[in-house]
Each structure stands twice: as structure tokens, then as C-alpha cells.
Image (cartoon, rainbow, N blue to C red):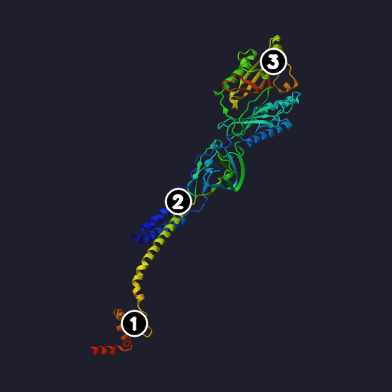
Amino acid sequence: MPITAGVVALTLAACSVPVPEPSETPGLREQGALQEGQSDRIINLTLWELDAADAVKDASLFGERVGEVTGQVRGVEYIVAAKGGVAADLIPRDMQAVYTTSSNDWPRAMVAVTVEPDATHAPVVLLWVQDSPQALYQFRAWAHMVPRGVLPAMPGQSTGTEQVALDADLFAISPQKAIEDYTAVLNGGAASELEATFAPDPYRQKMFEARKALSAAASPRGGTYTDTVTARPEESYVLADAEGGALLFVRLDVVSDFKVPGAQLALSASDKALLKGSLGSRVVYRYQDFIVIRIWGQGADALPVVVAADHHLVEVATS
Amino acid sequence: MIRRFIGPILGIAGLATIGVGGIALLLRVSSDAHPVGDLETAVVIIPPNVVALEGLNEITITAPGSFLVRTARPADVYAWATEVETSVVRRLESWEEIEVDRVWSTTGILPEHTGDMWRGWERGSSEKMIEVSTIEPGLAVVIISGSTAPLGEVAFEMTRDRGNGWAWPVLAGGLGVLAIALVFLAVNLIEVRPEKKEILAPKSKRPEPKKSEPKKSEPKKSEPKKSEPKKSEPKKSESVIPKGKRRASKGKDA
């Protein structure tokens, strides 16, 4: 009997099938934070919001997908266009490239490049930002490609591109230094000692030309014209490219101050529509600019170059 | 001599082995398992390593109302869930029970539209079955109640090893041993039979008593005289003589 009981006990013990334990987390096939379907959805919802506001020229309709500054820029474009100024920027609906990050941190950037709508319009670079895991990606800025601007090859969405810190020491120049130096060039003008450290670009060329003309207009009457450019590094993002370099998406505050003591300035109808206050001898234009700088990998000889840039007026004031 | 014991010993061993194998077969578990876990929060995360559990085929969510089933990168899900009171499915406690941990949060439930990290979207109501094969490996599953009410229950449909896989080989081995034992027993039997024949042979050689010989019932007396057939012949006439008369005749002879 004890032998029988032992056999049965052993048999019963052997019968217990162990439960499977969770093993290591299986690797993701697609590492990118946003896959094509997800980015398409973000783009479509943004364009839907943009279309709805564009249809009635009402910037108050922006909110969920179009960010505050972008909405402000677009709202100014509606006013300028209504007063006979230039029409609001055309933002094509079709994208030729979308860059997403593989980052596990926030904020995260997503960039799309539109197709070239026609021979007179350049492709547009669009920037979205997600501030936190719970937040939605918001359309924060856009800029047209500069003539002969070339974007580098970027990692695909399935892997995502690395979103790099501004002080990363991975490139021929750190993103932070590139932004600081370019801001210094913009402030210093063509005579800046750092001017030669960047490849020529039409954005700063136009800014310098306008500065020269307005300074020339003001100076005979004892007036002045100054541009003050300030970068917003906390709202700038770096995406590593597939060639060892990176694209810097940089927000700039530009304040253009024109004053001629004793003079009564006159403005265009569209600028007048934007004016806050009573115009006298001084007018201050404020811009929210967005530029894209391409920097190169370590050891490269090429200079950093601006590949896309837009000068967006947001305010006209008397001080 | 030893050979005579091999058969019985093997027979007992074979029967015991068959018994063990048979019991083991009877005690094998079902190949299906349906462990269940309670969900006490409105948001539940099933991490990718749980989704990848061996044998897990389906996940069924039961809730009092509507809910969303989403998939996303684990890092995104955990970052998103830091502001949500969440349950996390950890492991199987047993084949009947799923271990679910509750992760407390000071904030409430987020609106369902928040976040852009979701790769998969599905809606469910009351009960929804998710086929594990449809979930991209490496993604976490998040279930979000349509209200602030807890979801209810999570159940797994699993295929498992029935256990005691050794039972069939043991049973077969036992049958084999028993067969060998039977062979030994049969050989023993064949070897024993000739000895019995030697004992029985003289009896079979006895002359068949004729029907007319009434003394068939007295073999003992006739045996010693087998070698003297001549003396037996006169007894043929004696066989009809009653016993009492035989004694008398003996007395006369004497």
C-alpha cells in the first residue's frame, strides 16, 4: 500500500503543468514613434482644421491641431490678404516626405515636406510638435524651401529618425552653436565675422538687403532701422539625417524697429490694419520666423546652410 | 531455477508500470486553459511580454459598458499612463487566475481622444475578444473604459501542454515488459509439462480392462501381478465369485 500511494503521489506531482512566465519583451518591428497611418491622421486632421479656418478667414477656429503661434501667423495673413496685401501662403495637401522620431522622450517633432505645387511655389516644410504623451501633435511652423535648397536623406518612418539634443556633439558643429552663430550673423549683418561660416542663403540676403534699404531711408533724417533676432532654442528641434548630419528646425523672434525722429510715418493698408496704437515717428514690426538649417557630419568640409526659411509677420506696433 | 522467477517478476513490474502510466494518462489536464483576472480600474495595460505568453491565443475583455482597445509602443503607453489610474496585467498566477496589479495615480481618467501614439484602434462593448495573432509583436495593449467605471474582467484563452507526456511511453514500456513476462511464463509452462508426462506414462500403458472384466475396480491388486499374466488368467473365473465365497475358497486353499 505505501508503494502504491507513493506512485500515485509521484504521478499527481508530475501532473502539475507549470504556467508560462512572461519572457523578454519582443522587439518591435517598427521602432518609429509614428507610423505612416498615424502621421497621415495627424496631417489630415491639421489640414482639415486649416481648411475650415481658411474657408472663412477666421483664425479663432484654430486650437486643437494648429498651434497658437501658427494660428497667429495665419490670422495675420488673412488680414493682410483682405486689405489687398499678399495672399495667405499656399500649403499643399500632398506630402513628398514625412520625418518622424524614434525618441522615447518629449517633446517630439514631426516634419513633413509638401510637394512643389507649381513652378512659382516652392515645397513647404511643416513642423508638428507633441509636448507630452497626453498631448496631440500640433502644427507649429512652416517655411518654404529656398531655391536650390536640398534636404538630406532621412531615415524612414518604420525606424524613425533620432531626435538629438541641441548640445549633442555628434556633428561638424553642435546644433546649439550653429543656432547661436547664425543668430549672431543675422544680428551682425553681412559684416559679421561669422558670416563666412555659413553658406550663402536668400533668407539672410533679403534681410540684409531690407535692412540696408530701410537704414538708408532713415539715416538722412537722423532715423535708424535695426533688426533684433533672438532664437528660441526651447522651441527648436534637431533630427539626425541618414548621412551623418542633421536638420535644425529653428524658431526665431525678429523685431524690426524703424524710427525717424519728428517724422510722421505712413503704412500700407495691410500694415495699417495690423497696427496697434497710433502711428507717429516709430513703427515696430514683429516676426515669428522659422528656418531649417542643415548641418553636416563630423569631418565634413561643407558649411551649414539654410534650406528653408519664412519671415512671418505677426504684429505691427508703435513700440 | 532463476528463470522460473523472471516471468512473474517481469509480470508484476509490467503491471505496475502500466498502472502508473494509466493513472498518469487519466490525470492529464485539458489542453485548454481559461485564466481570469479582475480589473478594478478604467484603464488596463497588457504589456507585450504578457501578450507574447506561450500558448496565449485570445484575450477577452468584459466590461459593463463600452471601451476602447488600443495598441502602442510600451514606452509611449507607460509615459501616457503616468497620469492615469491603471491596472497592469503582470503574469499568470495559475492556470485559473491572472495576476493584475493596480497602479495608483492622483489624477483622474483622461479623455479617450488624448495622445497620438496609438497604432491600433478598436471599440468594444460589454465583451470583446482580441486575437493575439492580430497584435503586432512588441506592442502593448491598452483597454480604456468609455466611462470612469472599472472595466470588469480580463480572460485568456490558452493552449497548454497537457502534462505527463511520459505517460504513453511508460504505458507502452509496461505493455512491453508484460509481453516479455508472458513469454517467460509460457516457456516455464512448456518446460514443466514433459515431467508430468513421465509420471503419467505408466498409467497410460496399463492394459485396457475388458468390458467383461469386472475387477477393473481393483487395480492395486492386479498391479503386482502385471508381470505374471499367466496367474491372472485363472482369476477371470474368480471375478464372478462373491467376496464372501472368495474368502471361503481362500480358506479351502489354505
**Foreground mark, 3 or 1?**
1
Q: Is A225 or A9 nearer to us in this picture? A: A9
On the same chain: label 2 and label 1?
no
Residue sitting farthest toward the right:
A84
Task: Find numbered disc 3 in the image and state the secondary structure of the residue it sits on.
Answer: helix
Q: Chain of mark 3?
A: A
Q: Nearer the viewer, mark 2 or mark 3?
A: 2
Q: Mark 2 vs mark 1: give the one in front.
A: 1
Closer to the chain start, of discs 2 and 3, is: 2
Disc 2: host chain: A
Towards the viewer: B144 or A192: A192
Mark 2, secondary structure of its residue = loop
- At label 3, counting other C-alpha atoms closer than 10 Å, the crowd grade (few under 14, some 14-19, many 20 or more) is few
Labels 2, 3: one chain = yes
Q: For residue B217, which numbered disc appears in the image?
A: 1
Q: Quadrant of the N terminus of chain A?
A: bottom left
Chain to which mark 1 belongs: B
Percent x, y for residue B182? 41, 62
Which label was assigned to residue B228?
none
> Label 1's element?
helix
Q: Which residue is mark 2?
A: A16
Q: Position of residue B115 (x, y in %)?
A: 60, 36
Q: Position of residue B151 (x, y in %)?
A: 56, 46
Label 2 close to label 3 by CB (< 8 Å): no
Along the line of sight, which residue is nearer the eye, B73 or A240? Answer: A240
Residue on which the image places disc 3: A209
